[in-house]
Structure formats: structure tokens, C-alpha cells
Amino acid sequence: MTERVERVLVVLVILHSVAVGMALLTVPDFALRFGGWEETGPAFFPRQAGVFHIVLAMGYAIEYFRHRGITLLLSAKSIAFVFLGFSTLLMWPAPWIVPFSALADGLMGYAVALVHRRASH
């Protein structure tokens, strides 16, 4: 049962990363304004972040479905949690998406780690 829950969680994280990536890649101005930024600037960097999200999602999928591993996923979510958390503090008041993403990435990583630990025992 916990292996199935783990697989579902990992797939949801992958889909989330692909969705964020596609939004940043295809509609960067909308994505940034939706996230709370008033000015968006050149589209290159949001699009680059979109490609990065998609690359990470593919890395999560390859590692998980080939080896049942979650190292990349946990590393990326942990780094994102710390980076976004500090960014929230340093740029307060931050656009709403920054602290929300910190919390979401932290919770996604924690949930996958917890379920993986239970599935491994």
C-alpha cells in the first residue's frame, strides 16, 4: 500500500513540476503576474526556469522509475525550500508565490521522504 502511495506522490510532484515549467515556458508574463510580481522584465529568465522545472521533473521520473530513488527529488525540494524561505525573508514583503512555494516544496519533499521511509521498511 505505501509503495503505491509513494508512486502516486512522486507522480504528482512530477506533474506539478511539469505544470509549473510549462506555465513559465509558455506564458511567462502571466505566470509572474499571477505569482504576484508587478513587473515581469524579459521573458528569457522565466522561460529558462520553466525548462529547468521540466528537466528536474524528467530527472525525478528517470530516477524513480528506473531505481525507485528519490535523491534528486529530495535534494531539489530541500534546496528550493531553503532558497525560497530565505528569499521570502530577504525581500519581505515578497510576492505571495515565494513563501507559498517554499511551503509547498517543503511539504512535497517531506511527504515523499516520509512515505518512502515507510515503504522501505
Image (tube, rainbow, N blue to C red):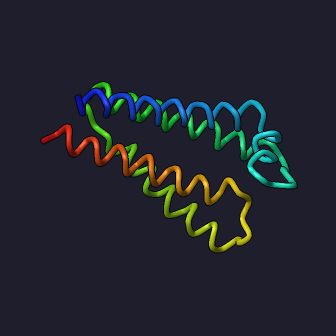
Is 73 left, or right, of 39 in this rendering?
left
- Picture residue at 78% right of the left edge, 53% below the top: 36
Residue 42, position in %: x, y?
83, 47
Where is 86 relative to 98, above or below? below
Residue 13, position in %: x, y?
47, 36
- Picture residue at 56% right of the left edge, 65% below the top: 85
Is 112 left, or right, of 93 in this rendering?
left
Is 64 left, or right, of 99 in this rendering?
left
Report the quarter where the N terminus lies. top left
Observer-nearest residue: 96 or 77? 96
Where is 102 relative to 22, above or below? below
Report the quarter where the C terminus lies. top left
Where is 76 relative to 29, above or below? below
Q: Residue furthest front?
A: 1
- Picture residue at 29% right of the left edge, 48% below the top: 114
Residue 105, position in %: x, y?
50, 50
Observer-nearest residue: 108 or 90? 108
- Picture residue at 37% right of the left edge, 44% below the top: 72
Is 57 left, or right, of 114 in this rendering?
right
* Numbered label tally: 0
Residue 63, position in %: x, y?
33, 33
Image quarter of residue 69:
top left
Observer-nearest residue: 36 or 61? 36
Image quarter of residue 9:
top left
Where is 103 relative to 12, above or below? below
